Image (tube, coloured by chain):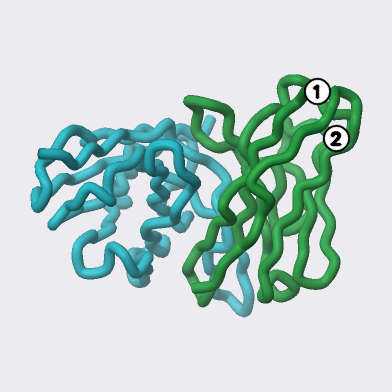
Amino acid sequence: SYDLTQPSSMSVSPGQTARITCSGYALPHRYVYWYQQKPGQAPVLVIYKDTERPSGIPERFSASSSGATVTLTIGGVQAEDEADYYCQSTDIFGTLVFGGGTKLTVL
Amino acid sequence: EVQLVESGGGLVQPGGSLRLSCSASGFTFSSYWMSWVRQAPGKGLEWVANMKQSGSETYYVDSVKGRFTISRDNAQNSLYLQMTSLTDLDTAIYYCARGSAHCHSGDCFQTGVDYWGQGTLVSVSS
């Protein structure tokens, strides 16, 4: 398997834009998913298949890619966005890989 | 509404066994890849295993190969994880997760997860 690298933590002020990166050599060739997890809760899907947003997820959540790095962008961060964020992709056929997670703190 | 409800977790001694179950509702269970994902206390998410809709294909993370077995009963809308030779490294919350898939040339393979259960805690300790 291969590794997906995320910053362990970051902080932003309310109303600012948060950009969480995820790097992995195979990312240009594989779908990427993003999950939000709040303390004591199960993860929630916020972005699927690179850039698609599930119904019910606010429009301030978006994603983009550049080479082997993908970026989850949260525009106009709100206090409720404070959470852990995980990127996820696939290794060989059928095998899922998660990034180490980024703890987003809203100051 | 998609619902995934795990059960079967608990305290088990090192070397012991445990069987987790996941009851699914709100969708056509037999049409989806299904996975188990775990999270050790204070740690990140780790994919454990998944199974194709028909059960014809299964995949495991290296650390559980030969010890864990994923299975499903499409008639009962249920997913299972049989865990043996448990060690303290297996202590975690285990989530049942519905697969998001990409289909190409008539075949579909899992690329992510779109719904998660609330998880069941497995503690391995003497």
Q: Amino acid at mark 2?
A: Arg
The green one among the chains is A
Q: Nearer the viewer, residue B6 or A77?
A: A77
Q: Is there any visible trace of residue B100 in the rendered image?
A: no
Percent across and percent down for residue B63 are 31, 65
Q: In the displayed structure, does residue B99 sit left or right of residue B17?
A: right
Residue drawn at (61%, 63%), measured in percent from left and top?
A4
Percent across and percent down for residue B45 are 48, 48
Query: Where is B4 relative to A2, above or below?
Result: above
Residue drawn at (75%, 58%), measured in percent from left and top?
A50
What is the chain letter for disc 1? A
Q: Nearer the viewer, residue B18 or A66?
A: A66
Badge nearest the viewer, 1 or 2: 1
Residue A60 numbered mark, or none: 2
Q: Amino acid at mark 1?
A: Gln
Percent across and percent down for residue A78 are 80, 23
Residue drawn at (70%, 35%), measured in percent from left and top?
A104
Residue A78 numbered mark, or none: 1
